[in-house]
Image (cartoon, rainbow, N blue to C red):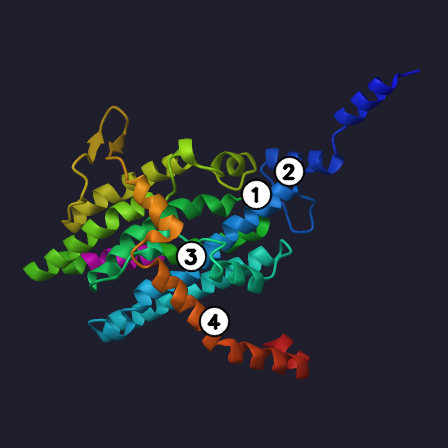
Amino acid sequence: MRSKGQIEHDETDVADPRELEFQALIDSDQRIEPRDWMPDGYRKSLIRQIAQHAHSEIVGMQPEGNWITRAPSLRRKAILMAKVQDEAGHGLYLYCAAETLGVDRSELIDLLDQGRQKYSSIFNYPTLTWADVGAIGWLVDGAAITNQIPLCRCSFGPYARAMVRVCKEESFHQRQGFESLYALSHGTTEQHAMAQDAVNRWWWPSVEMLGPPDTESTHSAQSMAWGIKRFSNDELRQRFIDMVAPQAVVLGLTPPDPELRWNEERGHYDFGKPDFEELRRVVGGDGPCNRQRAAHHLKAQEDGAWVRAAAAAYATKHPAASAAA
């Protein structure tokens, strides 16, 4: 006959079979689907990350949308309009992925408007010239691709599948940004100077947007253990630098980093230390455009309330037509 202490010890050691099944799926590099059991921490971490990603796509429409009416040609205008429309679609895919975790997108948007959820720090910088649109495409979308391609192998199925299409479109955006900057940098002296100025301003924020250093990252280790992330922030930052440094040579533009140079021994580019204190300030709400971005998003929500109400009323009256649409 076992003692009470032995009984308590045995019961404590018995693992939840659902947790064992979950871990087995993670260990075998399989996908977790919404119908599967998952730990609360895993669910909360995914909601936080997917929501931040979705918010970034939506708020990220603002800096470039600022130039739609001022694009230098009809071709450039059409390209930019298509890109901004793509970003809206990305936000939709991601909000849908988050909803499979049992949270409503309206709740997530409310949390964003209340300042209780974040979006990428990079979208709190102003677009001062047309060249900024090219710099965003080359650098910002380049950093996003570096971070997002591994997410196509994320352990959560809906997020991974959404990322496949997002990455295809972001790759096009990055190439378009490169092409736009190339045209400017190989144009007039004034156009080259404009392109260089844009790179000077967007280089370091793009390097920093891949997150704080691994020693200070709050969520990376657990996210990697769960298979949500595949690489650490510092690994992704090195991949990004290795990608864009040689592209800068083709562009004929000079990154504002005197320490940037190829290291033959490492087989990677060396680069200077990003200003992570600036990153913390911007994430904390003290960037150049934080308040402007938040106010613009809130106003858009308020101005569009009647459209959402009308759509909901129509769906109630004509459910079959709404379902077909």
Find out whether the residues at labels 1 and 2 contact each other: C-beta distance under 8 Å: yes
* Residue 176 falls within the magenta-colored stretch: yes
* Residue 316 shown left or right of residue 261 in the figure: right
Mark 3 secondary-structure assignment: helix
Give the alpha-carbon distance from disc 1 to disc 2, as whole Å.
9 Å
Q: Quadrant of residue 5?
A: top right
Give the amino acid type for the residue marked by disc 1 in the picture: Ser
- Disc 2 vs disc 4: which is toward the camera? 4
Tally of numbered tags: 4
Query: Which residue carries the number 4 mark?
Result: 301
The numbered disc on residue 155 is: 1
Q: Is residue 186 above or below residue 307?
A: above
Mark 4 secondary-structure assignment: helix
- Disc 3 vs disc 4: which is toward the camera? 4
* Residue 66 shown left or right of residue 158 in the figure: left
Give the amino acid type for the residue marked by disc 3 in the picture: Ser
Give the amino acid type for the residue marked by disc 2 in the picture: Leu
The numbered disc on residue 56 is: 3
Q: Earlier in the sequence, mark 3 or mark 4?
A: 3
Examine the rendering and report whether any part of residue 186 can be seen.
no
**Span colored in magenta:** 172-181
Give the amino acid type for the residue marked by disc 4 in the picture: Gln
Find out whether the residues at labels 1 and 4 contact each other: C-beta distance under 8 Å: no
Tell me if mark 2 has few (under 14), some (14-19) or many (20+) residues whose alpha carbon lies within 10 angstroms of its own: some
**Residue 133 image position (x, y, % from top left):** 26, 61
Mark 1 secondary-structure assignment: loop
